[in-house]
Image: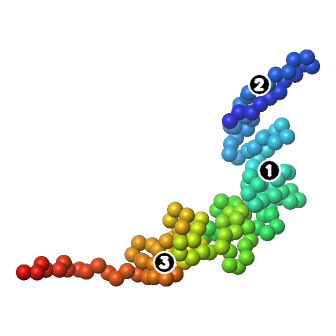
Amino acid sequence: LRYQLDISDGLVSQAVCCRRPCNALAPNALYANNECIPRGQLNSACTTNAQCGGGEGMECVKGQCQCFAGFHPTVDTLTHPMKNPSQSCSRDCETEALSKDTSCMKPGGLGSLCFVQRQCPQNSGCYRGRCMCRCGFEQKGDKCQALPPPPTTTPQPNS
């Protein structure tokens, strides 16, 4: 990554491309106000909002990275049962909506647009942006019902 440095001696002005400062410290530091400052995570010390999780749902409040009002610490029950393995904040959503990072998404029916699996009804999933029945299930009205098991014997040819 490079940044532009403007140089002027009062008569002539030119721009020079330089290596971005703090590259050697990346991703643990960022360049702000002409200095390298540590990148913060939830509850870590900070002096500027830019330090707090790249601005994804966090801000610097009284010298500490905190979730924005209307956000909460992310809990990922699939990969880590404890709070905040990624040190991020998710938006608080209405009870019928699902939180995905900084967005709230409502659950949908079969055939509706989706972004995450949890938006889709039981026995269905989000495939290419639409709620569709999973393998082994077929759509019956607005539900996905299990297909009957395949026959275990092959029919005998008629003689």
Q: Position of residue 151 (x, y in %)?
A: 25, 80
Q: Which residue is mark 3?
A: 123
Image point (57%, 76%), residue name = 109
Q: Toward which corner of the image does residue 91 lie, by quadrant?
A: bottom right
Which mark is first along the chain, 3 or 1? 1
- Callout 3, which amino acid? Asn
Q: Which residue is mark 1?
A: 50
The answer to whether 46 appears left or right of 20 in the picture is right
Q: In terms of depth relative to the viewer, which is nearer, 41 or 94?
A: 94
Q: Toward which corner of the image does residue 13 lie, by quadrant?
A: top right
Q: Toward which corner of the image does residue 11 lie, by quadrant?
A: top right
- Callout 1, which amino acid? Ala
Q: Position of residue 50 (x, y in %)?
A: 79, 50
Q: Is residue 157 visible?
A: yes
Which mark is first along the chain, 2 or 3? 2
**Dot 3, crowdedness within 10 Å: few (<14), some or many (≥20)?**
some
Which mark is first along the chain, 2 or 1? 2
The answer to whether 79 appears left or right of 59 in the picture is left
Q: Is residue 83 visible?
A: no
- Callout 2, which amino acid? Val
Q: Which residue is mark 2?
A: 16
Q: Position of residue 115 (x, y in %)?
A: 59, 65
